[in-house]
Each structure stands twice: as C-alpha cells, then as structure tokens.
Image (cartoon, rainbow, N blue to C red):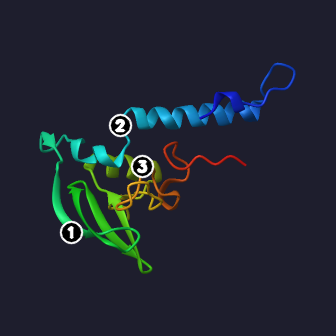
C-alpha cells in the first residue's frame, strides 16, 4: 500500500480511487487482526474451549512438494481436479460461510488461496474460488 501512488486530480481523489484505497486498507487491517496462515493454530475453538493447535507431519504442499510442516488442526487437505488445496475448517468459519451463502449441506471448509509466500498450504488469503466477494480475498485493481 503506497500512499504516494494515490492519483489526485485538482487536489482530490476520484470516487473509484477512494473505494480502492478503502478496500486495500480494510484488507490489510484484516491481516493485522490475525488473518495469517501462521496464526491458524492459535485460533480458539469455542466448542472445545482451547486453541486448535497443530501437528508436525509430512504433507504435500500446494506446489506438489513434500515438506515437514506443522499443519494446523483447523486446516484440512483436499484434492480437486488433480490439484492440492487446503481449507480452514474451524467451526465458526464454516458456520459463518454457510450463513453467507445459505449452503448448509455443501460447505465443509473455506479454501485458502494456493498462491503462497510460505510455499506449502497457501494463504494468507481466501481462495477467489471460495470467496471472491470477501475483503480478505485478493485485491484487484483494474
């Protein structure tokens, strides 16, 4: 987020530029508040009254490589059309997503973006396949 790259016209920014800046800033605040793959083990399971935690194991990363990794207990691997993906499956995340899309029977988890800086389970964004409308998905500037 580069504030010096905000386009001004006659000392003001356009409505479109304002919307983009608000979106980007809100998105980044989401990361500040804890939406990071590395923090998933520390998410709190309200039903169990404890943090989800993680298990050290060898897993297949989204790029197909094997790696020893502490997989959060609130994340599961899925395979779709030959690709490896990971989903956040915490009770609260799944319930909120079911509420948003009114899909009680379909959804078992919320896919994490496979475009990854950490090189294994993906993140720290929701997959556009799952939630392109949600603020913590990718930021697109057209």
> For the residue carrying disc 1, how many other residues have a C-alpha within 10 Å: few (<14), some (14-19), or many (20+)?
few
- Up-down relation of residue 72 to residue 30 (above or below): below
Q: Are marks 2 and 3 in contact (CB under 8 Å)?
A: no
Using the numbered discs, state the Cα–Cα distance from disc 3 to disc 1 in whole angstroms.
Answer: 21 Å
The quarter of the picture where the N terminus appears is top right
In the image, 49 versus 6, the foreground residue is: 6
Q: Secondary structure at mark 2?
A: loop
Mark nearer the viewer, 3 or 1:
1
| 73 left or right, relative to 127 | left
- Whichever of callouts 2 and 3 sits on the residue coming sooner in the sequence is 2
| 87 left or right, relative to 126 | left
Question: Circle 1 is placed at which residue position?
Answer: 58
Question: Circle 3 is placed at which residue position?
Answer: 124
| 50 left or right, relative to 21 | left
Using the numbered discs, state the Cα–Cα distance from disc 2 to disc 1 in whole angstroms.
Answer: 25 Å
Mark nearer the viewer, 2 or 1:
1
Q: From the top left corner, tell me how far across and down residue 92 is, in percent.
A: 29, 45
Label at residue 104: none
Label at residue 34: 2
Say which residue appears at 18% left-offset and 47% top-offset. 52
């Amino acid at each position: 987020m580069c504030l010096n790259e905000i386009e001004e016209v006659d000392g003001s920014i356009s409505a479109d530029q304002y919307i983009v800046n608000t979106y980007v800033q809100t998105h980044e605040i989401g990361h500040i508040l804890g939406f990071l793959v590395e923090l998933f083990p520390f998410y709190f399971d309200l039903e169990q009254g404890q943090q989800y935690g993680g298990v050290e194991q060898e897993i297949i990363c989204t790029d197909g490589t094997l790696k020893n990794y502490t997989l959060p207990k609130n994340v599961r691997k899925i395979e779709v059309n030959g690709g490896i993906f990971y989903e956040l499956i915490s009770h609260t995340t799944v319930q909120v997503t079911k509420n948003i899309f009114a899909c009680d029977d379909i959804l078992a988890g919320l896919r994490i973006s496979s475009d990854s800086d950490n090189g294994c389970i993906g993140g720290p964004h929701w997959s556009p396949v799952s939630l392109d409308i949600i603020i913590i998905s990718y930021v697109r500037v057209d």
